[in-house]
Image (cartoon, rainbow, N blue to C red):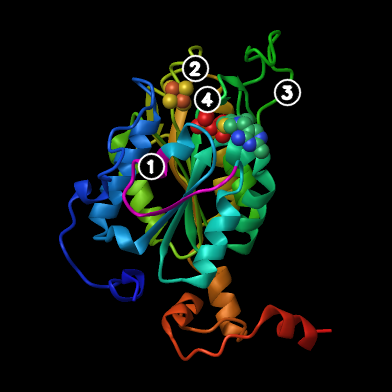
Amino acid sequence: MSKAFSAIEEEREVERDEFTPGIEPQPTWCPGCGDFGVLKALKGAMAELGKDPEEVLLCTGIGCSGKLNSYFESYGFHTIHGRSLPVARAAKLANHDLEVVAAGGDGDGYGIGGNHFMHTARENHDMTYIVFNNEVFGLTKGQTSPTSPKGHKSKTQPHGSAKDPIRPLSMSLSAGASYVARTAAVNPNQAQEIIVEAIEHDGFSHVDFLTQCPTWNKDAKQYVPYVDVQDSDDYDFDITDRREAADLMHETEDALYEGTVLTGRYYKDEERNSYQQEKQQRGDMPEEPLAERYFDEDYDWERSHDFIERHK
Ligand SMILES: Cc1ncc(C[n+]2csc(CCOP(=O)(O)OP(=O)(O)O)c2C)c(N)n1
Ligand code: SF4
């Protein structure tokens, strides 16, 4: 039987290095890349939560960020561009005992995968989604991405981007995410704390993670100095209040392009049911993970042909 079915709830001391794989333990990201910060924070968070690598599934998209699961010991699925979320959703529905984390770049998640992002948030699937936001397409050599600032010059926009960037936090809130935060690779303590909270949250947790790309986005700041909106006296708001959260998200998104990096927790709704909870309450999903049936030799599988016939 998979450990994911049995190891949950068992308390034990876990070392960060348990999440370092034997194969390809050294990341090949460029020196100074913010992606190292995500890996460190994620390993630290899993160790802090006492997770076992066999309890975790990490689904990634395509890009420099998509390499995350090569450097992280757990079940992993390196999906296709923009498609980490549908794969993560399917896995979580089949085995809701798994701790599911999806990750990818801003091009991956806010561009090609934007529709999945919107609907996974809307349906409040219980998982953590980390978006490496470096404001460019890193792997393919620095083209303009959905979060590149207006005026940003690249090979695809040599005269500067004519378009305003998307607003990832606001988009997430309006779509329906029940936990929304922004952190930065230069702020490792906050990053780990936020990932811990995001994983503990029952519902869709979205972490916009500012990851500098010193190779292709030399204009971009290293996301310092940053301000933690929870620590600063200048920001007093209720993270459970949608309107207050929306106002501060808007301010945060504008501020980034004016040189002020605001980070922290922006929104949390603990009342809303996750997709799985709703389905179970309606009787559409069994309490035990469907995937357990694979281990039941006596389970009477219905052929898809018969299933389709039955619904004709
Ligand atoms: C369907 C599809 N279209 C385009 C590509 C080419 N491609 C690979 S990575 C990438 C962009 C990655 O940028 P981002 O998601 O921001 O991640 P980063 O590399 O910056 O971490 C693109 C366009 C692809 N692999 N698949
Ligand atoms: S190209 Fe940019 S995002 Fe990719 S590994 Fe290098 S610094 Fe990181």
Residue at position x 52%, y 71% in the image: 94
In the rendered structure, which amino acid carries the disc numbered 4?
Answer: Gly
| Tag 1 near tag 2, CB within 8 Å | no
Pointer 1 residue: 70
Mark 1: secondary structure: helix
Q: Earlier in the sequence, mark 1 or mark 2?
A: 1
Q: Is residue 131 visible?
A: yes
Mark 2: secondary structure: loop
Q: Is residue 44 left or right of residue 149?
A: left
Residue 300 is situated, as x and y percent measured from the top left of the image, at 55, 90
Residue 130 is situated, as x and y percent measured from the top left of the image, at 47, 45
Between the residue at mark 4 and the residue at mark 1, the CA separation in whole angstroms equals: 17 Å
Between the residue at mark 1 and the residue at mark 2, the CA separation in whole angstroms equals: 27 Å
Q: Earlier in the sequence, mark 3 or mark 4?
A: 4
Q: Is residue 65 left or right of residue 171?
A: left
- Packing grade of label 2 (10 A; few <14, some 14-19, many >=20) is some
Cβ(mark 4) to ligand 1 < 8 Å? yes
Between the residue at mark 3 and the residue at mark 2, the CA separation in whole angstroms equals: 17 Å
Disc on res. 220: 2
Pointer 3 residue: 163
Between the residue at mark 1 and the residue at mark 3, the CA separation in whole angstroms equals: 34 Å
Q: Is residue 250 visible?
A: no
Disc on res. 305: none
Pointer 4 residue: 138
Residue 102 vs 293, above or below: the answer is above
Q: Nearer the viewer, mark 3 or mark 4?
A: 4
Residue at position x 54%, y 73% in the image: 276
